[in-house]
Image (cartoon, rainbow, N blue to C red):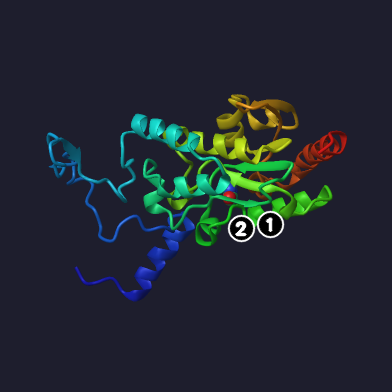
Amino acid sequence: MPPPSEQAARDLLAFYAEAGVDALVGEVPVDRFAAADPAPTIPAPAPTGEPRRPVSAPAVRQGTPVVAPDEAAMAARAAARSAATLEELRAILDKFDGCALKTTAKQMVFGDGNPRARIMFVGEAPGRDEDIEGVPFVGRSGKLLNLMIKAIGLARADTYITNIIPWRPPGNRDPTPQESVICLPFIQRHIELVNPDILVCLGKPSSQTLLNIKDGILKSRGRWYSYATPARQIRAMVTLHPAYLLRQPNQKRLAWRDFLAIQRELASTPA
Ligand code: URA
């Protein structure tokens, strides 16, 4: 077969980009039909005095967790609990290898804003722009979020912003439930350490993960909930995700109502 022309290669890349495939997960092509056998096991180097135990070949950049999900969730709980400050949490999360998304993301996206803010926004997961900059909500959704924050008389720097998942899922796919479970202890500790007066869940995945809300977002938005940390109950609001508002601009009026309720709540409760 003749090699593809440069134009054909460009067209293919444009097609991939249009379809949201804009991240490389490996350096060489993998024929997954040929790779029907499970990952081979290789013997781990035996530390002195300990028996050898087989371990799976590292699944880095293949989309599977580096450690078993249950083990990863347990490790995440212990690691998150051990963080006494936000800086410690950031460092611990950066070293954590239990979530395979880390292997495909460019970098971790931890949080942004004032760590002593009274209001904390939690989205779903970083997108392409956030992955490049290492800061949450800096793309189109972030610009809209900034405007919404400004509309209630605050600046982004007065708030704290983060996500349930700190690594960008490849091609912006939805995080799997397993990935959310593994990352949950970190966002729980993150909220506990920021300790805001108001927690705002942006979109359904955030409200589902943090508040266990099963209702659709149009039903659950605009209501007050209670989010429990070991130390206290925090008032929590569910609102529409800015990415949804970019697709459905006529729903901005609903988000506006939610933000006004947040503004009233901030004004009525002393700092
Ligand atoms: N969407 C999110 O949920 N989080 C971001 O950081 C950016 C877009």
Question: Is residue 234 visible in the rendered structure shown here?
Answer: yes
Q: Quadrant of residue 77?
A: top left
The reply to whether the C-beta atoms of the residues labelled 2 and 1 are less than 8 Å apart is yes
**Image label count:** 2
Which residue is rendered at x = 31% and y = 42% of the image? Answer: 66
Question: Is residue 38 visible in the rendered structure shown here?
Answer: no
Residue at mark 2: C-beta within 8 A of ligand 1: yes
Foreground pick, 271 / 268 = 271
Q: Secondary structure at mark 1?
A: helix
Q: Secondary structure at mark 2?
A: loop
CA distance separating discs 2 and 1: 6 Å
**Vertical placement of residue 28 versus 186, above or below:** below
- Residue underneath mark 1: 143
Residue 201 point in image, percent of width and height: 65, 37
Kind of residue indicated by mark 2:
Gly
- Residue underneath mark 2: 139
Kind of residue indicated by mark 1:
Lys
How crowded pointer 1 is (Cα within 10 Å; few <14, some 14-19, many 20+) is rated as few
Residue 89 point in image, percent of width and height: 51, 44
